[in-house]
Amino acid sequence: MIGEAAVFELGLMIVALAIAASLASRFKESDIPLFILLGIIMGRYGIGRLGDFYIGSTFSAEQFIELGAELGVIFLLFFMGLSFSLKKLRKHSGKIALVGTMDLLNFAPGILVGYWFFQDIMAAFLIGGIVYISSSAVISKSLMDLGWDSTPESDQMLERLVFEDIVIVVYLSVMSTVLLGEGIEVGSILLNIGLAMLFVIVFIAFMLVRPELFDKILQTKSDEIFVLRAIGIIALVSGIAIVMGLSEAVAAFFVGIAFGGTEHMAKLQKHLYPFRYLFGGIFFFWIGMKTDFLLFRGIGLLLFVAVLSSGLYKFFTAYYGAKFFKMDTVRSTRVGVGMITRGEFSLIIAALASEAVGPYAIPVITETIPAFAVSYVLVMSVLGSILLRHVK
């Protein structure tokens, strides 16, 4: 059994997350920055520097939080896939491809800034990924709060997010192969990409050939059985992906797409969203726990240059992309400032970097890059949501 101290730590963490969520809701801001700050304050590098007690001080609590963070990644990606469907992707594929191709340019500022500061290709590509991907969670929440979830600008933003999420799934597959043990051997990278593509192709083919199976799996009058079946499939498929050496995020994303094409989508959102919120909160808290805030002192200039260059670049690519589709200046500006927001995927990349092994287990990769990602997300998530709320 887990010891009393571990249960106390977990209870304290969840209560703190609840208070932070209430504050964020009251001020109508994203709760992600507050969850990260709580992790920094209550973890090893916060109150842990003042004494022996901190959240994660017992082995059992630390293990639970790490597992909860893993589940957070799975649920975040599952819900992202759930918002898509193969039918929707086919219907909007041309427009998604066009705006997404424009958006790929946003890798450039991060790669250039990363290489300028570190003279290291891997660091450059990690920073490129961190600054490229906008936050689906924060943007979607802001659009719903503002009542803009059925407007032309929200459609434009969501089409960009669809493309970004697909790109980042491929990016995560490649980077996890490189960072978590295989190195930069071309054969190993191609093998893992091939396995990932095979997994995706087989899964999509199965969805096309037997789409009714996913409906039947979830067909039950009992809400309890419904939840057990849904979570069981999500966890099992994600676990199979991990055993195959693939990213559980990729697997969860495509399970979400599979379930998104069923008649149970609304029911899944209703019953599984609390799990996404709980474990997503634990994931952001865990990111804060892993971050030594003293490292922020050495990345001030990097942060300033990255925020300025990537923020402006993201704004202008999104703004002129919207203009290309005949939107007026106000709507185009909303698209531009909305896409500035960064969040969960940037932190997933940071978590991947912090766990690097072999030749990449160096301080720049495992410490500096995650610290940069946390500080960057804190700035960009707040900046993006405030600008979106007040743009005229």
Image (cartoon, helix red, strand yellow):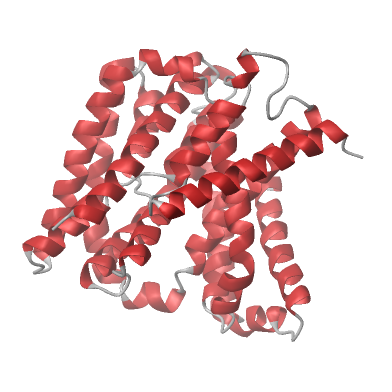
Residue lying at the far right of the rendered structure = 1
Q: Could you tell me which quadrant the N terminus lies in?
A: top right
194 and 103: which one is in front? 103
Using the image, determine if residue 322 lies above or below residue 249.
below
Residue 359 in picture, x, y percent from top left:
54, 18
53 and 306: which one is in front? 53
Q: Could you tell me which quadrant the C terminus lies in?
A: bottom left
Q: Quadrant of residue 237?
A: bottom right
Kindly tell me whether residue 294 is visible in this rendering: yes
Kindly tell me whether residue 119 is visible in this rendering: no
Using the image, determine if residue 228 lies above or below residue 178.
below
Residue 383 in picture, x, y percent from top left:
28, 42
Using the image, determine if residue 380 lies above or below residue 331.
above
Using the image, determine if residue 66 lies above or below residue 95.
above
Q: Quadrant of residue 113?
A: top left
**Residue at the spot x=49%, y=28% of the render?**
184
**Residue at the spot x=74%, y=84% of the render?**
220
